[in-house]
Amino acid sequence: MSIHAGIDIAARTFVLAWREGERLGGVREFAQSPAGHEAAAALLSRLAPERVVLEATGVYYLDLAWALAEAGLPVAVINPRRFHHFAALRAAPSKTDRIDATLLAEYAQRMNPPRWQAPDRNRRALRDIGRQINRLTHARTQAKNRLHALQATSATPPLLIEDECAGIAALDQRITQLSEAARELVDAEPALAQRLVHLQAAKGIGLASALALLAELAVLPTELKAKQVARHAGLDVRLTQSGTSVDKPGRVSKTGNAYLRTALYMPALSAARHDPYARAFYQALIRRGKKKMQALCALMRKYLTGLWACIRSGEPFDSARLFSPQHLQNT
């Protein structure tokens, strides 16, 4: 009898449910810890399921998925939106960890999602460092905004300004230290070092942006197509059309990797100003009636296509090959 398992993940615990054929085989709860991961892997190894499905939610799924994959289990990591639609079709009466885990086990049985390919430790460490740099950079921007507000009035005690300056300096030091560590990880793998150079061939992408982009792209399977990577980043366009009564404009889904979208934003903005092909593409969309943010999101998606081509082909970024020369003729 075939067995399929589903795992619902929370910050401190996760719930494992499995189906034996068409009936529920059992449900167990584990601590969200290395010991809990090991216990779940041991149980699943005894059950020998055909697929173990969990959602790519937050930061908690990766360590568990990694532990199960290292134990030789057939793990599948799915987009939460896909499971949301599946659960809606199944008309679940309530939403609890136990119910979600049971539905994920059924999803594994009905949908048979592809097996997840775990990134190696070096690339996983690079991704984690890249995300920490992103968080620290965001915190530094907030601190600089606070400093600007404090300096805008003469009533601010000097101690507050000194404290904010000290906080910014500490963040600068942490970002520099982590950036150096990320560069060491990249230099330790010639393929990654080459990709870092190729990404910087794109207008608007310096070392910091290239590291942030590489940290996210290096952990993806290279057999993914550009549309799949755009979907992973949440830059795919979702249409809302139904009969003759509903026909809304397409919108960027934003259901995906927010770190990758953040890393793409400033390079795309710079390319729209300084790369002639990207600028022509952007302006063509504006002439067609697109709003500036819509055109920029389209440029981000196009840029991501070119960057992913660099990752797969091992060639430097070339905007002349990415954009149609027709846009240049119309400028």
Image: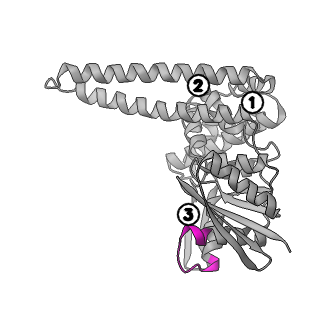
Disc number lying in front (2 or 1): 2
Q: Which residue is mark 3?
A: 249
Residue 229 percent coordinates (x, y): 71, 47
- Left or right placement of residue 112 versus residue 217 in this view: right
The quarter of the picture where the C terminus appears is top right
Q: Residue furthest right?
A: 1
Residue 318 percent coordinates (x, y): 75, 30
Q: Quadrant of residue 3?
A: bottom right
Instruction: Tell which circle, 2 or 1, labels the residue nearer the N-terminal end.
Output: 2
**Residue in front for this viewpoint, 225 or 44:** 44
Point out the stretch of residues depicted in magenta.
Answer: 89-100
- Left or right placement of residue 9 versus residue 39 in this view: left
Q: Which residue is mark 2?
A: 208
**Residue in front for this viewpoint, 173 or 279:** 173
Mark-to-mark CA distance, 3 and 2: 35 Å
Identify the residue at image location x=69%, y=72%: 26
- Report helix, strand or loop for mark 3: strand
Q: Is 102 above or below relative to 261?
A: below
**Residue in front for this viewpoint, 262 or 69:** 69
Q: Which residue is mark 1?
A: 318
